[in-house]
Amino acid sequence: MKHSRDKRRDDRPRPSASPPRAHAGQRPAEKLAKAPSEPSQTVAEHLPRRPGTLPAEKLPLILEVAPNADYALLDSGDGEKLEQYGPYRIVRPEGQAIWRRALPENDWNRVDAIFTGDTDEEGMGRWRFPKTPLGETWPMKHDGIHYLGRFTSFRHVGVFPEQASHWDHMAGLIERAKRPVKVLNLFGYTGLASLVAARVGAEVTHVDASKKAIGWARENQEMAGLGQKPIRWICEDAMKFAEREARRGSHYDIILFDPPAYGRGPKGEVWQLFEDLPKLTDLCRQILTPKPLAVVLTAYSIRSSFFAIHALMRDSLAGMGGTVESGELIIREKAAGRALSTSLFSRWLAI
């Protein structure tokens, strides 16, 4: 609401609890150390396996975002993607676009902003504006929710459109619940998921490790005209926050978490996805209400398949019933109809 990434998305700089995101983050102004190339199993070995029957499963599930008036993937290929964000056409690196472009060169040249410079996954770069120099922000909209798009030095633009599938699904769960619903958004980045949940009546707790990202999210809340909605904005390490909520006996009906592969929290806490994800997933189970609705995990920039996080979610929610659905988030390209995969996901649904 963290793109040319070989491993998928942490072009959003963000620490353990989301930028200073990418959707969840590190600090856009800082270059973080590289994550280890291979996963570590140290934390998982110390977690006891939960007893009980595993939830039912549905996989693979492909959740698709199609072009619309707010956002469209116009074309992709040759290591780049051409996108339309509201009034602006933007070119950014895209490591997975190994095919050839469908649109002619003239279409790719007729753009407002191009990300150039360091194309390393966590490297800093710059934007070039072929027409008129643009400011850092511009007005954007998602399903009637107004927010600000942003040109950052880490190539992301303040929103991850592929998440719209999760946002719409979550809004439906909240509306159909016909009761007060509490939502926890860990690694919340610039807050689109939090705003979607709040708009349909949920009480939201938004956690991110980046003060800058929290500031952007609060700005988006005002931009959306949702200033009176109950959203708690918390700048903290996601793991520490979840541990404290478990000790306090706090509970949530829906939990979203979108961690980076690697990041640092506001006090230097280190996040390593393969080491820390099992513990955080278990904590999320601990802080669910007696009648929960869903737990939604998205994973970017990892050398793995959705089967890995699918198995983790089923093990963590053993004995809870429901169903775990896992697969990929994709964006459907407008020019040739190709699908660009952006991330892996796994979500547990109580019903």
Image (spheres, rainbow, N blue to C red):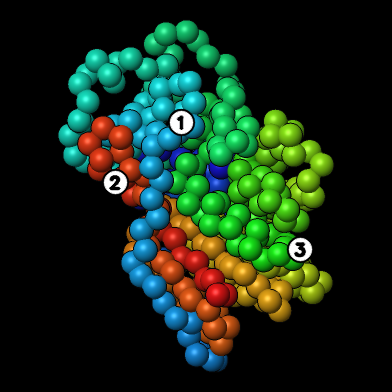
Residue neighbourhood size for the residue with mark 2, other residues' Cα within 10 Å, grouped as few (<14), some (14–19), many (≥20): some
Distance CA(mark 3)–CA(mark 1): 32 Å
Mark 3: secondary structure: loop
- Residue 13, given in percent of the width and then of the height, sits at 53, 41
Farthest residue, direction left: 100
Give whichever of discs 2 and 1 has the lower sequence position.
1
Q: Are the two marked residues, 3 and 1, in contact with CB atoms closer than 8 angstroms?
A: no
Mark 1: secondary structure: loop
- Residue 124, given in percent of the width and then of the height, sits at 47, 31
Q: In what quadrant of the picture does the C terminus appear?
A: bottom right
Kind of residue at badge 1: Ala
Give whichever of discs 2 and 3 has the lower sequence position.
3
Residue beneath disc 2: 339
Residue beneath disc 1: 69
Q: Are the two marked residues, 2 and 3, in contact with CB atoms closer than 8 angstroms?
A: no
The residue closer to the viewer here, 201 or 19, is 201
Residue 43 sits above or below residue 178 on the image: below
Kind of residue at badge 3: Pro
